[in-house]
Amino acid sequence: MICILDLGTSKISSILVKDEDTKPEVVAFSSIETSGIKTGSIINIGLISEDISKSINELENKSGEKIKDIIVSFSGEQISSINSTGSVIIRQKEVTARDVQSALNMSSTLKVPNDKTLLYVSPNEYTIDGQPGIAEPIGMNGVRLEARTHLIYCSQNTKENISKCIEELNDLRIKKFYFNQLGAAESVLTQDQRDLGVCLIDIGAGTTDLTVYKGGSIRFSKVFPYAGDYITETIATSLKITSTQAEEIKKKYGCAVLDSDSEDTLRIKGTNGNKEIEISRGKHFLKLLSNL
């Protein structure tokens, strides 16, 4: 069994999967609303620990399984990335798994700020003696092996704070950390899309995650601290209404592409005894979108 815990700004989701060789089977799923995370960063350790416990308990009740090890998936504005290369001399002429791992390790030796830690190394391609575009070098002959990789870093403090939340739950251990956009890409992108080139944008509550794939591998990734909550706040401020009203308007009437000639009129209940207001959906929402 594999348990994956996804820490989002608005909710904590967890899934229990039976690890089959052919096709993984979802055993149970849980989603708990939370307010202890903002733009991907924990702002209330106690609250997040409680919400994680609720989510895991729900999984255990649904599945009848006892969960001990978890994979933690998360995002946040503290995520950063860079492309790198690492090369090694092939020890015995024929490339082995040890040579590949050594090249990958060399690619991740870049100097980074002290507050950053390596989260994930994504191999893009390999080069043997100047021949690029090699996807699987093991077994090939050569003198020098070079690995071209995409490195993803996160804040050391973020990992430590997540660990504290988990450590408060004595029966849970973190198996590994994972950038959740990579999981999203595996779920929604086809191999053809990744080969030909595609940009995946995931708009959450607190962050917008962007990844670019080309030649089957990730080439660029970035996290922006502007997402659904920011849009809600902008609507609330502009119309002088509550966040609850703004969220309802966003979900009911929001649209990324809007006709400025739209004659739809929205009637919004006023707050603090103020009278009902009317706005043009087309003109007003276009103005809001242009200011985001």
Image (tube, rainbow, N blue to C red):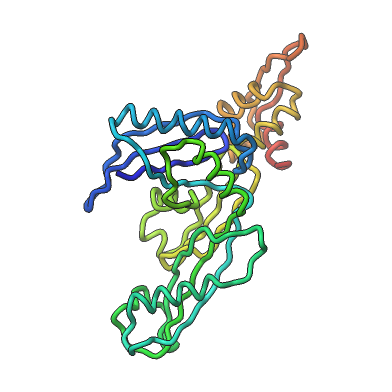
Task: Name the one closer to the observer, 159 or 140.
Answer: 159
> Which quarter shows the N terminus?
top left
Count every numbered label the image shows and give the total.
0
Vertical order, 116 against 282 (above or below): below
Residue 96 location (% of width, % of height): 32, 79
Pick the residue in front: 125 or 177: 177
Q: Is residue 252 left or right of residue 72?
A: right
* Residue at the left extreme, as displayed: 22
| Residue 217: x %, y % from top left | 44, 65
Q: Name the foreground residue: 202 vs 35.
A: 35
Quadrant in the rendering for residue 100:
bottom left
73 over 170 or under it: above or below: below
Q: Could you tell me which residue is drawn at 55 percent across and 58 percent down?
A: 221
Identity of the residue furthest to the top in this view = 273
Residue at 60 percent across and 43 percent down: it is 40
Q: Indicate whether 202 appears above or below 130.
A: above
Image coordinates of residue 57 in percent, x first then y, are: 40, 29
Tell me what residue is drawn at x 70 percent, y 42 percent: 292
